[in-house]
Amino acid sequence: MPVPDAPSPGALPGSDPSGGPARPSHLDPAIAARLRRTSDGLLAAVVRQYGSAEVLMLAWMDDEALHRTLTTGRATYWSRSRGEYWVKGATSGHHQYVRAVALDCDGDALLVDVDQVGPACHTGRRSCFHNNLPVTGVSGDERQVRS
């Protein structure tokens, strides 16, 4: 018998022309009304280490993933490749305990502060952002002025 809160594996959060949630969710309607989702019903979630602000990863949430994150204190995301929800650390043991969640000024991105246990990246690295690219179009002096 299906569990009401559990999505069907492989079910993709579809778009809703009204701009509302892609599928039923228990998210507070006042929060849901502030969200500007992608056409597939998702929000980018930038995840950083609480206290140090070290950026760890980027993941995707729909309304229900955000609801679960806010109400359980465990980072829950939508896997676009697997088409299902995942709780960070459920299989790897590299849990993310949520300390704070903020919505950006446009309502289209989330900042999730976590206490990260172990590496955040599926490659085993602390952060997913370990592939530095060369920046050559701006001189050192201009970089200092712009930052």
Image (cartoon, rainbow, N blue to C red):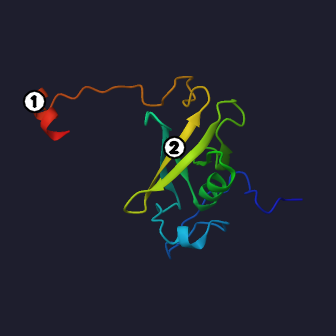
Q: Is residue 54 above or below residue 75?
A: above
Mark 2: few/some/many CA within 10 Å (<14, 14-19, 20+): many
Q: Is residue 95 above or below residue 100?
A: above
Task: Measure how far apart labels 2 and 1 are at the Cα level.
Answer: 32 Å
Find residue 100 and report its horizontal and vertical position in percent: 53, 49
Q: Which residue is the site of mark 2?
A: 113
- Point out the tag, 2 or 1, that comes first from the N-terminus: 2
Asked which quadrant contains residue 107, the reply is: bottom left
Find residue 73 and report its horizontal and vertical position in percent: 65, 48
Q: Is residue 1 left or right of residue 120?
A: right
Q: Is residue 69 left or right of residue 132?
A: right
The quarter of the picture where the N terminus appears is: bottom right
- The extreme front residue here reads 51
Q: Which amino acid, by three-letter code, is at mark 2?
A: Asp
Q: Which residue is the site of mark 1?
A: 141
Residue at the spot x=64%, y=30% of the render?
94
Mark 1: few/some/many CA within 10 Å (<14, 14-19, 20+): few
Q: Which amino acid, by three-letter code, is at mark 1?
A: Asp
The quarter of the picture where the C terminus appears is: top left
Residue at the spot x=63%, y=66% of the render?
23
Q: How many marks do you count on the picture?
A: 2
Residue at the spot x=62%, y=45% of the render?
75
Find residue 83 and report its horizontal and vertical position in percent: 64, 50
Nearer to us in this view, 60 or 145: 145
Nearer to us in this view, 94 or 24: 94
Residue at the spot x=53%, y=62% of the render?
41
